[in-house]
Image (cartoon, coloured by chain):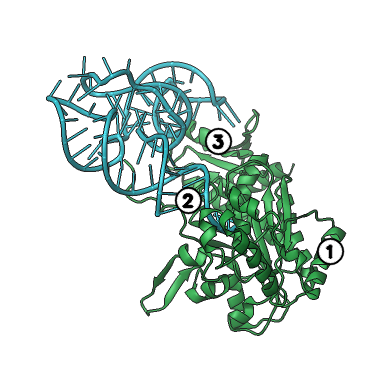
Amino acid sequence: MAPEFQTQPGTFDVLPPDSQRYSALVATFADLAGRAGFGLVVSPMIEDIKVFSRGAGAESDIVSKEMYDFEDKGGRHIALRPEGTASVARAFVQHRPPTPFKAWYAAPNFRYDRPQKGRHRQHHQIGVEAIGTADPAIDVEVITLAVELYQAVGLQQFTVLLNTMGDPTCRPAYRAALLTFLDERAGELCDEHATHYRANPLRVFDCKREACSRATEHAPRQADHLCEACAAHFSAVKAGLDAVGVAYVLDTRLVRGFDYYSRTTFEFAPTTIGGAQSALGGGGRYDGLVELLGGPPTPGIGFGLGIERILLACDAEGTFPVTRPALDTFVIDTMGGGEALTLVAELRRAGVRTDRAYDNRSWNAQLKAALRSGARLAVVIEERGMSVRTLQEKGEPEMVDRATVVEHVRKRLHA
RNA sequence: GUGGCUAUAGCUCAGUUGGUUAGAGCGCCUGGUUGUGGUCCAGGAGGUCGGGGGUUCGAGUCCCCUUAGCCACCCCA
């Protein structure tokens, strides 16, 4: 009974009509990003695994346990893309386009993780990367773009969380201060972090266990230990967001999962109650990544937004419903279907959205299909001739000539 | 990687302390309808009850294993 072949764990099919929301969401994002000067980048789903491991950091969960990787027939160590930024940064290094390089993408990402609500092994992200400028104005622009996308699909209940992670000038000193603080309180951390916090002390801020939250409540924060340049940058970003009217909440505990982040970091959190895996998207500045991947020192910033997460949030808010693209006409042919074959082609060439029934089915069956299709008009081919009639409400059939039926239909549709 | 719950028709689900030939609604197909409006009526197709093993005279039902799904932890989008 269960089919022999089914989707792999953590993967899924999206069928009509639900798939309409996917295409509509991407189209909306393409429009907004294009309006802001971002161009589409299409990059491979596979890369040398080091493209991802070098930037994200060996300590990150994604690299240490969630990568889909394999050796190809040429002996190359390949990984399926777990996140979008590294691929675009690699493309930047490879092609060296003029800066600022403003790119958007919509692509699948793969992470070998245990599936649950809002988390799949193949999920889809839309995102942007802006590489080649450290101007805080681009930080503002990028964050604003994400907010505009959410608003465009009708989301209201979300918060922009904002933080800064400093840069190589000020982070070492801060890191040392944090370690000193944690050393004194190691016993108060949760079991996992009590022994592992030294590897990446910032991760304790990410821990949601009560013990870690309490122990780090008064821990030193990066935002209070910024060098002059980072402080100025952060101030400019905040002022810019204020100026364009984007509301945000400072969250000094906000730490992002990849090592390559620096300075501005942000996350979009829904305020509707939902599953635990609900972050709508996140991103930040990664001023060292391009250099790590072999390019010149180049600043960059971007975000990734989870398509599935956005749609879940839309469900929670009752917005962005599935819409069926309405058909204009439905052709019913009870004379064998030969006439329908050519008429359908003519109507479609004339720009009329047209469907039909197949298999020479009964009048009733074809009429039912026509009604279900949502088409406005039916074109009926039967022994007594050809007629056009309304489908949405009752109306008298109007006899038409085969030669003029297309023109007739177009007039009716535009009336 | 860890834990909890679940698995019966395409979908949503019933199925009694283990007992005859497996049930409903929806959907689908045909007919009523050489016909005309989503209604209604009648009929039909569709199941090795996720898979394997065990207990039993007898298992959809009880036990074990396995696979998958959902939810949660960890972490992330």
Q: Residue at x 56, y 65 (%)?
A: A83
First in sequence, mark 3 or 1: give its number: 1
Quadrant of the frame with the N terminus of chain A? top left
The answer to which of A345 and A211 lies nearer the viewer is A211
- Which kind of residue does numbered mark 3 sit on? Arg
Residue A305 vertical placement versus A286 (above, below):
above
Is the residue marked by circle 3 packed among few (<14), some (14-19), or many (20+) residues within 10 Å?
few
The answer to which of A398 and A36 lies nearer the viewer is A36
Mark 1, secondary structure of its residue: helix
- Which color has been applied to chain A in this rendered view? green
The numbered disc on residue A250 is none
- Which kind of residue does numbered mark 2 sit on? Pro
Q: Disc 2 vs disc 3: which is toward the camera?
A: 2
The numbered disc on residue A240 is 1
Q: Which chain is cyan?
A: B
Residue A368: x %, y % from top left: 52, 33
Is A373 positioned to the left or the right of A318 in the image?
left
Mark 3, secondary structure of its residue: helix
Quadrant of the frame with the C terminus of chain A? top right
Residue A166: x %, y % from top left: 72, 70
In this rendering, does residue A352 appear at all?
no
**Residue position marked by numbered label 2 in the rendering:** A115
